[in-house]
Amino acid sequence: MESSYPQPLVMVDIALFTIRDKRLSLILTRRKEPPFEGLLALPGGFVHVQEDADTEAAARRVIRGKIGFDAPYLEQLFTFSGVARDPRGWSVSVVYYALVPWALLERNASVELCPVEALPSLPFDHQQIVAKAMERLRGKATYSSLPAFLLPGEFTMNDLHGIYQQTIGARLDKASFRHKILEQDIIEEIPRRFRTGAHRPAQLYRLSSKALTAFERKI
Amino acid sequence: MESSYPQPLVMVDIALFTIRDKRLSLILTRRKEPPFEGLLALPGGFVHVQEDADTEAAARRVIRGKIGFDAPYLEQLFTFSGVARDPRGWSVSVVYYALVPWALLERNASVELCPVEALPSLPFDHQQIVAKAMERLRGKATYSSLPAFLLPGEFTMNDLHGIYQQTIGARLDKASFRHKILEQDIIEEIPRRFRTGAHRPAQLYRLSSKALTAFERKI
């Protein structure tokens, strides 16, 4: 019977993005056991067949273990596999990427954060995984509500413009950004809610029900 | 040690598309053993850790075993997993989709072909896999050279227009299709090659080196 073949190791790894101090960053984990003990790596772990319904459930378990709550945005990225990627043997890693607002993380002192343009050398094939995750995030960011999941529930147009620029890693013209975003119906004004400060009061926005529905289809 | 957990079964499954008689179709396989013995299903198989360098190599091995040669276009689609999808146990299927010109297949009498709009009820989660593969194929087809990989090496603008319509499953205005395709530099005229027949001679085209390079980056 075919299934008596030796089976690969099966794990999940997570590219967990946030934006702190205007820099797109990844949440890393310091490895507590071999291989690569002591090095920073993407959070991950083996699938627990007795506990996880599927690999997405395994990814959610790993994320909760790492940050204490569910990531508001989670999506399967790609599956990395082969004989060479992990010294423990032929392995399959189903990789997910997730977006978390920094505001939800900053209480968690144990989180190790690293800006994507200043990552240390990562073990396994995590360097390749990060490259693929960045490509997907930037590819999707331009024409979707994706980067808004890096913001808390209420934000100004200025916040949103900043977070898109930081996600994409490029400058975006403010007027045409505003026009495109409003045209796409992914955010809506919160009636009579403004942020006051040094400047004139700024209208507060939230994700529209259209964007949230698209997001729930993902979840 | 973590890796002593019981490991899931790991397999690959392939959505292998072709176009015959102007209908987008899938190559299916009649299952020779349980579970679901005798039913038509997507071609697939367990990863052979002693033989396959990674899951893509496993997918190529399955495709060669099925059609006798490599598919000109192959891409990872998505990974399906969980306790419920296969009666043999907790399993992970890394799914690929591939495009093959019918001209390369028609000599192979053993291939079972089924138009995508007339598929039988498929076992496992293969129905879901097909839905996802169709979504990806149609999503990518509109703005890429992808459907051209369903054609033989030389084709007329008319052939190409037809194959895009059949892939996308919608009518496309001929003039603006022609304009868009030429604008994108994904095909090029073959100097002094025409197809002659009942109508006036039609210029023959091939994929441009730009399209082939993009394709080789995939392969």
Image: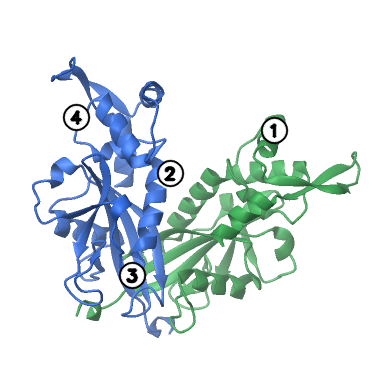
Chain colours: A blue, B green
Query: Split into 4 quadrants, where in the image is the C terminus of chain B?
Result: bottom right
Q: Mark 4 — on which chain does it sit?
A: A
Q: Name the image quarter holding residue A140.
A: top left
Q: Mark 3 or 2 closer to N-term?
A: 3
Q: Is residue A36 above or below residue A178?
A: below
Are labels 4 and 1 assigned to the same chain?
no
Q: Toward the viewer: B9 or B111?
A: B9
Q: Which residue is drawn at 70% across and 41% down?
A: B161
Q: In this view, does B112 lie above or below A109?
A: below
Q: Mark 3 — on which chain does it sit?
A: A
Q: Mark 2 — on which chain does it sit?
A: A
**Mark pair 4, 1: CA separation:** 44 Å
Are labels 3 and 2 assigned to the same chain?
yes
x and y, in percent, of residue A33 in the image: 18, 75
Q: Mark 4 or 2 closer to N-term?
A: 2
The residue to which callout 3 is attached is A124
Q: Residues within 10 Å of mark 3 (few under 14, many from 20)?
A: some
Drawn side of residue A1 relative to residue B7, left or right = right
The dot on residue A126 is none
Are labels 1 and 2 assigned to the same chain?
no
Q: Which amino acid does label 4 sit on?
A: Glu
**Mark pair 1, 3: CA separation:** 46 Å
Q: Which amino acid does label 2 sit on?
A: Gly
Q: In this view, does A166 lie above or below B70?
A: above
Drawn side of residue B17 relative to residue B12, left or right = right
Q: In this view, does B35 lie above or below B173?
A: below
Q: Which residue is drawn at 54% across and 46% down?
A: B140
**Mark pair 3, 2: CA separation:** 25 Å
Q: Which amino acid does label 3 sit on?
A: Phe
